[in-house]
Each structure stands twice: as C-alpha cells, then as structure tokens.
C-alpha cells in the first residue's frame, strides 16, 4: 500500500498531518536516533579530552572534523542502517554503537579508539539525556511559543472588551453580571501561571552507569572523579545532573512537565467550553467563509467546530499525558523496560495538544462579538439586581432583608418598572435609594473593568 496521509492509521499522521509536521524534527524516530548519536559522540569526545584516561589519546583535528561530520551529515540512509543493525541485535542502543564503530572504521586512527564508544555506559545513560534534549527543545521551540500566542490572544481580547457587560451564569442560571474582558482575563491569568511554571521546571539527567553507582567507571579508573566528570558532561547540555538514581533517571521531572501541560490543557478545555456556550447563546457571531459548510442538510449552520475539535484533541492528549504521569515514576527495582515504549508516546500526547492549540486559535480568529444580543440578554434579566438591593437594605439595618427581597421577587413579575416601584417603598437613605434607582443590569459589574485595566498592579 502506498504510504501517505491517507493511509496513515493515526490521525496525527493522517487527517492532521499538516498541523504536526514541525514536531517531526523532535519527536520522530529519526530525531531520537540523532539525539542519541549526539550523546554517544559527545561522551567519546569528553573521554578523549580526559588526561587521566591514558589509553585514549586526544583527538587530532582530522578526527574531530570526521566525528563532527557524522552528526552534521546524519541522513535517512544512516538512520536506516542503524535500524538494519537493530533488526539483527534486537537492541536499539547497541545498534547505534555498532553503527558508530562502522563509521570510525573508515578512519584508521579512530578505528583504533572505537572501544571507547559507549564506554562504561548503560543504554539509559544515552536515552535519558536524549529525551532531556527532546523535551527541552519541544518546550522552547513549540510548546511555550504557542502557549504565549494563546495567552496573548486572550489578553488582547480581554483588553479590547474590558467594558462590555455580560450576564453571568452560575449553575446555568442568570447571576450577577460581569464583563467579557474580566471573564477572559480569568483564563489568561490561569494559563499564564502554567506558562511560568513550565518555563521553570528543571530538566534532569543521569550518566552514572548500570545501576547508578559508576561501577564500570570505577573498576576501569578507580582514582578518577567520575561523579564530577559526569555532572560536568550532563551540564554541557543545559541539563541538571541527577546523581542519585538507579539504572534510569526516575522521570519525576518529566511527570512535572506532563502534568503542567495537562493542567494548561484542562484550563483550555474550560475556555473552549465557555466560548462554545457563548456562541450557542449568540454572544458571538462566527465569520462565515464562502466555501465553508456547517451542516450537510441545514444550509444556515455555521458551527463552532474548531472549539469542539480543540476540546476533543485536548481530552485525547490529557488521557495520554495523565497515563504517562502515573506510569513513568514507577520502575521495578533498579529498572524494567516498560518506560522505554511509553516514553516514545510523549510526542503523540503533545501532538494532540499541538493540533488543539492551532484549532482554538483559528476558531477564535473567526469570532465577532454580538453586542446587541449581549445587551438584550442583560435587559431581560433584571432579577440579577436582587443582590445589590438586599445588600443596601442590610446596610440600612432592615431586618430580614434577604427574605423580603426573595418574597417580592417570587410574587411579582420581575422587570425594570416593578423593581423601581419596590425600591421606592424601601426605608433606606435617599442616597442609597438613588443608587438603586439608577442601577441597571449592565452597570452592575462591580470592579470588573478596574480589575482588567489595573491587572498588572493587582498581581504583583
């Protein structure tokens, strides 16, 4: 069968192929092989620079250029060769070592040094740093930039509509008014917290051998400071050394990253659902593209499919992220292999998120606020003024204020005329009576606008 997006099993490589192409440079098998190769070569180079290892002479310029070209010229043909070797060995890292030995055999001086490839290493020394680089680059190149775009889009919307009053709904019922800007700013603030948290999570790495005790290192060169040597090696990748591990780096930092992404996604799911609800109440009008079809049978339909699609992909992503977070910190004794196959699915989880983020941004770009519908909705719900009426009654020491207002609202049709007639009967100060007579649902927004305009002041 011809391989294409049409024959792909996963929608990530099929229907949503164009959304996820950029992620291949980090999460593909080819990318993983290249990251591993880099770690192996850098370890070999570090050993060669070590004066205490007399059996491995320093690299000359010809050898350095040759090795550098192995990384910079790494091709699909090279990757395929590694997979050919793995097919025989049934071991991914050993096949990489054999591949490097093949390469080194092309230069006589390097061939003589090839036994120091993968010297004193366990496979997980290579793997954990490779995944550290993958997550570091994914965070810097893809996740944080698109999160920044999302929160910036929401922030600008919040500022633009800071004074557009809307009817709130708690438990689905009409409630104290707010503003569109403030409701959007709530999401902006929550998402920003996760953005800052993700930036600060330290990526950890180990390079301490088979069970974390430098056994092979120490037997070969017992007088050498392997702990600090390996720490320096790890730090060269902008990864924080984790000295106390078993055979594997325990993945706790990965769990932190995945949980942070899952948390951000959960906030965005809530955002998508709220926007969907506002669209269903006609608070937004969707920009109609001439060739776009909302329903196969109802020509008038323009559905909020981008937000629905985003929500669905976020749910899928979180299902995988949450599973990974529960599984990855657990390993039998000094190590079992369950994490190996699971780690390969981090890219799958992030791909679903990446699709969702793009869908949300596209959907949001097609929205237009419907101010007339929003205002009409407020004007049809004067009952939301029961709160300010009973509060000012309480301030004037009227007993059972809450109950009096409740009874009036139950016995009368609630509209502007009846409410103002009720206010006239109240035994409260003329100042408070004037306040209540002048208030309308769209004006009863508290400090909503102030909270938006002075946002940066309040979060310091």
Image (cartoon, rainbow, N blue to C red):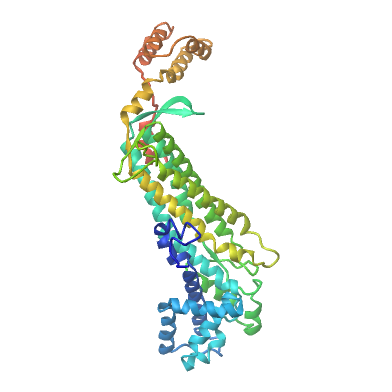
Give 406 or 51, whichever is nearer the viewer: 406
Residue in the image at 63% along x and 57% along y: 327
- Is residue 286 depicted above or below 192 in this figure? above
Q: Quadrant of residue 332?
A: bottom right
Query: Residue 248's spot in the image, x, y percent?
Result: 62, 67
The spot of residue 260 in percent (x, y) is 51, 51
Q: Is residue 447 left or right of residue 207?
A: left
Does 72 sit left or right of 233 as displayed?
left
Viewed as shown, does residue 204 lie left or right of 199?
A: right
Residue 145: % across, % down: 39, 55
Please tell me whether residue 190 is drawn above or below residue 207 in the rendered image.
above
Name of the residue lying farthest toward the right:
333
Please indicate, yes or no, whether residue 167 appears anywhere in the rendered image.
yes
Residue 239 visible? The answer is: no
In front of the other: 443 or 375: 375
Looking at the picture, does residue 392 appear above or below residue 48? above
Seen as rendered, the residue at the extreme left is 290
Q: Residue at x 36, y 19 (%)?
A: 440
How many numbered marks, from 0 up?
Answer: 0
């Amino acid at each position: 069968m011809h391989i294409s997006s049409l024959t792909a099993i996963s929608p990530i490589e099929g229907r949503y192929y164009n959304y996820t192409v950029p992620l291949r440079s980090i999460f593909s098998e080819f990318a993983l092989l290249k990251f591993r190769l880099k770690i192996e070569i850098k370890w070999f180079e570090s050993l060669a620079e070590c004066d205490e290892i007399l059996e491995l002479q320093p690299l000359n310029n010809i050898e350095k250029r040759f090795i550098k070209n192995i990384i910079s010229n790494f091709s699909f043909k090279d990757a395929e060769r590694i997979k050919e070797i793995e097919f025989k060995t049934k071991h991914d890292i050993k096949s990489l070592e054999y591949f490097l030995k093949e390469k080194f055999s092309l230069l006589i001086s390097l061939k003589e040094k090839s036994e120091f490839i993968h010297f004193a290493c366990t496979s997980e020394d290579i793997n954990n740093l490779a995944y550290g680089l993958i997550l570091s680059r994914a965070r810097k190149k893809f996740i944080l930039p698109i999160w920044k775009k999302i929160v910036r889009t929401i922030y600008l919307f919040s500022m633009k509509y800071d004074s557009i009053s809307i009817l709130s709904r708690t438990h689905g019922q009409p409630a104290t008014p707010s503003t569109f800007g403030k409701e959007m700013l709530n999401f902006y603030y929550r998402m920003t917290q996760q953005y800052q948290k993700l930036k600060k999570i330290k990526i950890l790495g180990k390079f301490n051998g088979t069970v974390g005790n430098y056994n092979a290192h120490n037997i070969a060169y017992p007088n050498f400071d392997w702990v600090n040597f390996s720490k320096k090696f790890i730090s060269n990748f902008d990864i924080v050394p984790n000295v106390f591990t078993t055979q594997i780096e325990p993945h706790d930092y990965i769990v932190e990253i995945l949980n942070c992404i899952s948390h951000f996604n959960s906030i965005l799911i809530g955002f998508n659902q709220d926007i969907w609800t506002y669209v269903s109440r006609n608070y937004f009008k969707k920009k109609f593209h001439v060739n776009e079809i909302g329903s196969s049978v109802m020509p008038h339909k323009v559905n909020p499919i981008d937000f629905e699609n985003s929500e669905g992909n976020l749910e899928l992503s979180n299902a995988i992220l949450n599973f990974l977070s529960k599984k990855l910190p657990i390993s039998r004794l000094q190590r079992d292999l369950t994490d190996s196959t699971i780690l390969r699915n981090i890219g799958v989880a992030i791909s679903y998120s990446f699709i969702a983020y793009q869908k949300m941004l596209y959907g949001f770009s097609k929205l237009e606020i419907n101010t007339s519908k929003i205002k009409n909705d407020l004007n049809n719900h004067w009952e939301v003024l029961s709160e300010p009426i009973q509060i000012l009654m309480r301030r004037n020491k009227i007993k059972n204020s809450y109950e009096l207002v409740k009874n009036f609202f139950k016995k009368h049709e609630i509209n502007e005329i009846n409410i103002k007639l009720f206010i006239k009967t109240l035994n409260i100060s003329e100042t408070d009576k004037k306040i209540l007579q002048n208030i309308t649902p769209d004006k009863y927004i508290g400090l909503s606008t102030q909270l938006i305009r002075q946002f940066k002041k309040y979060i310091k």
